Image (cartoon, rainbow, N blue to C red):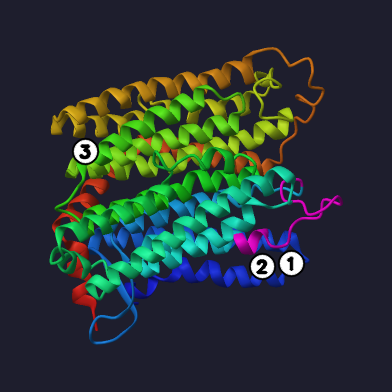
Amino acid sequence: MDLANLVPVPVLLPLLAAGITLALARHPAWQRVVSASTLAINAVLALVLCLAADALGPIVLWVGAWPDGTGIVLVADRLSALMVLVSSVVTALVVIFPSRRDIADGADGAPVSVFHPTFLVLTAGVSNAFLAGDLFNLFVGFETLLFASYVLIMLGATKERVRAGSTYVVVSVVSSTLFLLTISIVYGATGTVSFAQLPERLAALDPGLQLVIQLLLLVVFGIKAAVFPLQAWLPDSYPTAPASVTAVFAGLLTKVGVFAIIRVQTLLFPESPLTDLLLVAAILTMLLGILGALAQGEIKRLLSFTLVSHIGYMLLGVALGTAAGLSGAIFYIVHHILVQTALFIVVGLIERVGGSTSLARLGGLASVPLLAVLYLVPALNLGGIPPFSGFLGKVALIDGALETGSPLAMLAVVAGVATSLLTLIAVIRVWQRAFWQDQAPDNERVLSVRVLPRIWILAASALVAVTVALTVLAGPLTAYAERAAADIRAGAYQAAVEEAQP
């Protein structure tokens, strides 16, 4: 079998399953079976693709092409294959969690029949964005996942979800319109949107026009990644959605934006890193995000602000423009996808048990020991406590900054250490108030529901176990990230696409 034919499967398989689950709209149990089975298969195939890309180099498939290189190309290099694998694992575990209460349509509590089809379309869009070999197909991937996310964020049509979803939709439409405009400018100036062809053609443009294009792309992807000062939409949008939806949004969607920034900076503008600008953005994203988290009294909003702050770590690695910085960013993306997803899922369980996610209304959850462990492990990981992967990822990024040695890089080191300490304070405050303080006297629902579905416990435990496994596998993952960074910097991506062109 030609491995290139495996590249589009992570996109096509969920789309096929979406059609099947839509046809099973009256059978929610079968919808869940089809979704979970499809995403489990997708994860296995993504692992095969990841191992193949690591062993053989970038795997390229042209889906229709003309002699001049016009066509749709999908590329699974080490970076994109790793992102597809991690996203497949996350979606396969998270799809288990939606309950009738979470995705309710109307007073009768009937499950929303479009959840599983839409979730599968979201998965396909994420995979397509990671595998896209040109700007326009990247745009298609973004629009696919955004279209699905519009539906998921408003499931149940409660007042809060509609309000938050409206903000999310407006911001997404603005960023997508700007993205399409930028693609038009790029194509008009260069005659192509291919990641393999653009570096050479962009280099031939006037430096001023190059800078305008680069800044436009960074603004577009900065909005999607929630980079300061373009992050204000996120904390208001994510917390109102069902726990499973929020977990995927927090874990995956912003990382697609970070991935796109890596593609732009390393493939299209390798000689124009804009280091100082990106370092300033990284520092402010880290600090303002975590300060916002410390001011929150609701767990989902608190975690949403920590999500913003930790995007700053990833941007720091990209901003350094070095192999060490890039490999550190790749490692940290994988770490944060898994840890942030696990935390939001556990918070969903806390809400189920305690009846709230408000720190003012929670208390006494330490009487549910398994839930306490499931929260504490990823929380400490997010805070960067050794020997967890969060600590290892931060050390790698700080080492890269110290190696650079510039004043802004040193300031970024200080900001990174401060953000890590403040993150630890934020998550421990949740631990102290939700688990150790006495039950809130004004909340009759606290601890009124102690029984969690066994499948939820198993899936949440699996997610937390995967975050712990990152520590055990930190050595191989770091080596993989270093090889991925070396590939990007050596031009392996462009060479593979040109070689595979019909």
Q: For the residue labelled by badge 3, is the local secondary structure a helix, a strand or a loop? A: helix
Which residues are the magenta region? 101-118
Question: At which x and y percent is residue 344?
Answer: 56, 38
Q: CA distance from mark 1 to mark 3?
A: 52 Å
Q: Which mark is residue 276?
A: 3
Q: Which mark is residue 21?
A: 2
Foreground mark, 2 or 3, reads: 3
Q: CA distance from mark 2 to mark 3?
A: 48 Å
Answer whether residue 103 is magenta in the image.
yes
Q: Are marks 1 and 3 in contact (CB under 8 Å)?
A: no
Q: For the residue labelled by badge 2, is the local secondary structure a helix, a strand or a loop? A: helix
The numbered mark, 1 or 3, whose residue comes first in the sequence reads: 1
Which residue extends farthest bottom?
Answer: 67
Type of residue at label 1?
Ala
Q: Specify whether 450 is left or right of 242.
A: right
What is the crowding at mark 1: few (fewer than 14 residues within 10 Å), some, or many (at least 20)? some
Question: At which x and y percent is residue 4?
Answer: 33, 73
Q: Is residue 73 above or below residue 221?
A: below
Say which residue label 1 marks: 25
Q: Which mark is residue 399?
A: none
Question: At which x and y percent is residue 54?
Answer: 26, 58
Q: CA distance from mark 1 to mark 2?
A: 6 Å
Q: Specify whether 162 is left or right of 83.
A: right
Q: Are marks 1 and 2 in contact (CB under 8 Å)?
A: yes
- Magenta segment, principal secondary structure? loop
Residue sitting nearer the eye, 489 or 270: 270
